[in-house]
Image: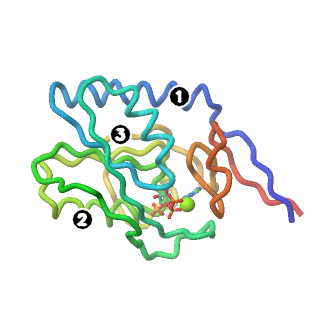
């Protein structure tokens, strides 16, 4: 079996949409400092592009969680591999995800991070795959709604590969 990748969202479109999202976030946050929480590893490319395009004061922290391992299906169990460096108490927090699929990761994170008493907690995702939702989560900023296909690129992986593609593509398995 061989794998190939079909372009779903070209690089220029992804970058243009991230700029628009950053403008909206900048307008919503006004003069306050915003703490972006980059959910490793998938959202690392998106977080960087977003951070560069937000006007105003931005802090960054990183958390690593995983539920997919090397599979195209979620194990159903979200594991924290690396926690944040700093407390969130009193901060305006924006969780930055690459994709919401079943919703398990974000819903777990939301509960976990709320308990740390941030001043505000918003969620943002580059991609949303609504057809696959198992757990309901309401997201403040969505880049693109995509069909029920396994995607890679712009940070998203299959078995840790393809993260470096500068576009979003659909992974296809060929006989
Ligand atoms: O809505 P869900 O079904 O929970 O899926 C979304 C999550 O799955 C992926 O992470 P993964 O576990 O693959 O870790 P990774 O970012 O290190 O690749 C992705 O980056 C999201 O965090
Ligand atoms: O479509 C996907 N691609 C890569 N990682 C993912 N994690 C959840 N859904 C996906
Ligand atoms: Mg992954």
Q: Is the Cβ of the residue at disc 2 closer than 8 Å to that at disc 3?
A: no
Q: Which of marks 1 and 2 is nearer the N terminus?
A: 1
**What kind of element bears circle 1?**
helix
Residue behind mark 2: 111
Q: Mark 3 points at which residue?
A: 141
Most foreground residue, 59 or 134: 59
Q: In this view, does 68 lie to the left or right of 135?
A: right
Task: Give the label, 2 or 3, closer to the camera.
Answer: 2
Q: Is mark 3 on a helix, strand or loop?
A: strand
Residue beneath label 1, please? 15
Q: Distance between the residues labelled 3 and 1?
A: 15 Å
| Quarter holding residue 160 | bottom right
**Residue 117, located in which quarter of the rendered image?**
bottom left
Distance from label 2 to label 3 (Cα)?
18 Å
Q: Which residue is drawn at 46% across and 37% down?
A: 143
Q: Quarter of the picture for ligand 3? A: bottom right
Name the residue: 89% across, 64% down: 175
Mark 2 Cα within 10 Å, few/some/many (few <14, many 20+)?
Answer: few
Relative vertical location of residue 10 with respect to residue 120 in this rendering, above or below: above
How far from the left and from the top, in percent, is residue 58? 27, 34
Colour convention of the picture? rainbow
Q: Is the CB atom of the residue marked by disc 2 within 8 angstroms of ligand 1's nearest atom?
A: no
Q: Where is residue 19 in the image (x, y as percent from the top left)?
A: 43, 25
Left or right of 117 on screen, residue 125: right
Residue placed most toward the observer, 163 or 86: 86
Up the image or down, 50 lies above or below 135; here it is above
Q: How crowded is mark 3: few (under 14 residues within 10 Å), some or many (20 or more)?
A: some
Residue 168 x, y percent position in the rendering:
62, 42
In the rendered view, does 166 fall on the left or right side of 87?
right
**Which residue: 29% across, 58% down?**
84
The disc, 3 or 1, on the residue closer to the chain's N-terminal end is 1
């Amino acid at each position: 079996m061989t794998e190939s990748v079909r372009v779903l969202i070209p690089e220029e479109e992804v970058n243009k949409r991230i700029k628009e999202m950053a403008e909206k976030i900048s307008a919503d946050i006004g003069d306050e400092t915003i703490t972006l929480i980059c959910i490793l590893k998938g959202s690392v490319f998106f977080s960087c592009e977003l951070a560069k395009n937000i006007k105003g004061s931005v802090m960054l922290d990183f958390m690593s969680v995983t539920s997919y391992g090397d599979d195209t299906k979620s194990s159903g169990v979200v594991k924290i591999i690396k926690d944040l460096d700093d407390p969130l108490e009193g901060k305006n927090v924006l969780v930055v995800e690459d994709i919401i699929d079943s919703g398990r990761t974000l819903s777990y994170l939301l509960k976990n991070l709320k308990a740390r008493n941030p001043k505000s907690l918003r969620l943002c995702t580059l991609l949303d795959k609504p057809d696959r939702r198992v757990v309901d989560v309401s997201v403040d900023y969505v880049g693109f709604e995509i069909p029920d296909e396994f995607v890679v690129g712009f940070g998203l992986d299959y078995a840790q590969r393809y993260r470096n593609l500068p576009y979003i593509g659909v992974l296809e398995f060929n006989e």
